[in-house]
Image (cartoon, helix red, strand yellow):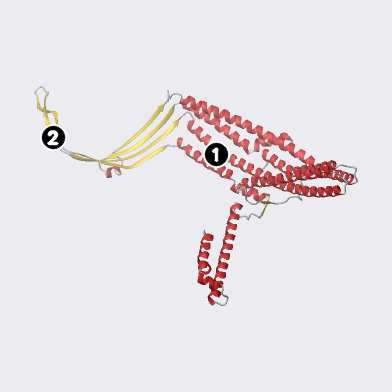
């Protein structure tokens, strides 16, 4: 809006200087004072307009950069370390807010469950009323004579009763409490307390899940960037190969087929490079999403190429990792707690078949005068103590349906727990295999690269002297690229597998 307004103002101010006939003629005369003033005015307005446009452009670029950045305070060009990424994800990832909300909800329900065993106390401090009755006229039998034998003679007469006004004041205090309900109340309290524990386990599980996702995606970004650099170098090498083959073709040393093969290999390598560029963008978008940022925000990660990627062998056996997971993995602990809560819910549903015993105590003071309600406490009072035993003999199919539902939920919770244990077991086995295989690949990496480079050198030499084929050269280049790709991937896969193993076995704490 500011840019459009400035443009309209600029046009309105220079229109008389450009399109007015007399001033247009004056501008064509270099000796006219009005011409000099008009030219100076146009230049000044142009300068103001350009400065305003530049300022607006700078402000818009900064605002767009902040929007693309999508991060809370860090500039988009700052290099983020792994620790910063984990801290950011634990703070801004929506799953953390959801997990915290579940804890608050469970705590509220746990607090409210105590209402089933605590007495309900009600106090009415003052209850005043006044009833006004007008004159009443009615017919009724009244005694008119007493006979010698003691009998009374009655006669129906018209009776008149004068109107009156009556006041009534009351003070009431009552308490109702449940003495027995088949264990439903106390089991509800135990279930809600268990749900609070489950929600806390869920928060820890979500924290560790987000942390291992950040670690995996962080190293995935590093791996993708290194592979993209490797493919970029291979494109350059294949371009040099095309130039060499073209030179040999011009000298009549090779055929046209070799040049076509070299160009085809160059195009294939360019396709691989483009795909790897896409993989870099996808890896950064995935990491940004986990960090709670806009997925298109600029992201730069710390380079770890100098790090030793060959760790020591695993110090524990598979059985030890599985035993650790059963006692420390928060997903297993959460689902185990959910199964416990489901069994308690089944007992609650069974308790509906038992009688309910309730008690009540009430104290009341009643008088037509207010001072007698709040004074003379030895008068005008009443105390009532009650006991009630009730049993639902027939409520249709509802009790049976609630019990069957609770029973089914208990079975579902137990099967879910077993499924979680199986998934964690599979994750541990997969992580151990990935760690061992990647470690072996990295361990023989230097030798593999040296052998592939030597093989490439030999076939290139044979091709230069006319005793080899271009297919041999291309094949050797592909083998070397595949070897380097496998080693680079394995270097990062080792770290990812180790962190996933810690997470699955319950040894990752964040």
Question: Which picture quadrant has residue 435?
Answer: top right
Which residue is more in the foreground, 156 or 379?
156
Residue at 79%, 49% in the rendered image: 239
Whether residues under marks 2 and 1 lie with C-beta atoms below 8 angstroms apart, the answer is: no
The image shows residue 142 at horizontal and vertical percentages of 13, 28
> Can see residue 316?
no
| Foreground label between 2 and 1 | 1
Q: Is residue 51 left or right of residue 484?
A: left
Q: Is residue 381 left or right of residue 208?
A: left
SS at badge 1: helix
Badge 2: how crowded within 10 Å, few (<14), some, or many (20+)?
few
**Can you say whether 182 is above or below 27 in the image?**
above
Disc ID at residue 196: 1
**Direction top: furthest residue:** 149
Disc ID at residue 394: none
Residue at 44%, 26% in the rendered image: 355
Disc ID at residue 160: 2
The image shows residue 170 at horizontal and vertical percentages of 30, 40
Residues at marks 2 and 1, CA–CA distance in whole angstroms: 72 Å
Instruction: Give the mark nearest the N terminus, 2 or 1.
Output: 2
Q: Quadrant of the C terminus?
A: top right
């Amino acid at each position: 809006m500011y840019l459009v307004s400035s443009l309209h103002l600029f046009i309105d101010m220079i229109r008389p200087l450009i399109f007015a006939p007399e001033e247009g003629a004056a501008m064509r005369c270099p000796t006219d004072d009005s011409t000099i003033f008009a030219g100076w005015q146009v230049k000044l307005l142009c300068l103001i307009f350009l400065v305003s446009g530049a300022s607006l452009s700078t402000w818009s670029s900064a605002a767009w950069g902040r929007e693309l950045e999508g991060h809370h305070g860090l500039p988009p060009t700052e290099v983020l370390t792994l620790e910063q990424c984990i801290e950011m994800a634990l703070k801004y990832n929506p799953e953390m807010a959801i997990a915290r909300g579940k804890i608050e909800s469970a705590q509220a329900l746990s607090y409210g469950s105590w209402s089933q065993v605590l007495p309900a106390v009600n106090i009415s401090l003052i209850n005043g009323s006044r009833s006004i009755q007008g004159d009443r006229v009615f017919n009724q039998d009244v005694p008119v004579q007493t006979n010698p034998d003691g009998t009374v003679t009655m006669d129906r007469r018209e009776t008149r009763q004068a109107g009156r006004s009556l006041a009534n004041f009351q003070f009431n205090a009552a308490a109702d409490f449940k003495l027995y309900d088949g264990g439903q109340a106390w089991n509800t309290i135990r279930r809600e307390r268990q749900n609070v524990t489950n929600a806390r386990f869920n928060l820890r599980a979500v924290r560790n899940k987000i942390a291992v996702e950040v670690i995996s995606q962080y190293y995935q970004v590093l791996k993708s960037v290194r592979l993209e650099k490797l493919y970029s170098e291979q494109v350059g090498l294949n371009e040099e190969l095309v130039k060499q083959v073209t030179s040999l073709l011009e000298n009549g040393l090779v055929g046209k087929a070799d040049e076509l093969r070299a160009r085809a290999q160059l195009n294939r390598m360019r396709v691989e490079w483009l795909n790897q560029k896409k993989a870099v963008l996808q890896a950064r978008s995935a990491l940004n999403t986990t960090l709670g940022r806009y997925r298109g925000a600029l992201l730069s990660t710390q380079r770890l190429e100098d790090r030793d990627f060959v760790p020591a062998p695993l110090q524990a056996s598979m059985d030890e990792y599985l035993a650790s997971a059963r006692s420390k993995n928060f997903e297993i602990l959460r689902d185990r707690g959910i199964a416990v809560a489901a069994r308690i819910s089944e007992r609650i549903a069974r308790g509906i078949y038992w009688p309910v015993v309730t008690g009540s105590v009430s104290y009341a003071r009643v008088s037509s005068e207010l001072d007698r309600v709040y004074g003379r406490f030895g008068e005008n009072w009443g105390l009532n103590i009650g006991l009630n035993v009730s049993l639902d003999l027939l409520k249709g199919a509802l009790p049976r349906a609630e019990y069957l539902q609770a029973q089914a939920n208990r079975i579902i919770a137990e099967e879910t727990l077993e499924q979680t244990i199986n998934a964690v077991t599979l994750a541990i086995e997969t992580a151990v295999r990935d760690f061992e295989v990647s470690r072996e690949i990295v361990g023989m990496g230097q030798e593999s690269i040296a052998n592939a480079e030597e093989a490439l050198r030999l076939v290139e030499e044979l091709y230069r002297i006319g005793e080899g084929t271009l297919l041999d050269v291309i094949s050797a280049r592909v083998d070397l690229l595949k070897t380097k790709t496998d080693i680079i991937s394995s270097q990062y896969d080792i770290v990812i597998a180790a962190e996933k193993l810690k997470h699955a076995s319950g040894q990752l704490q964040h």
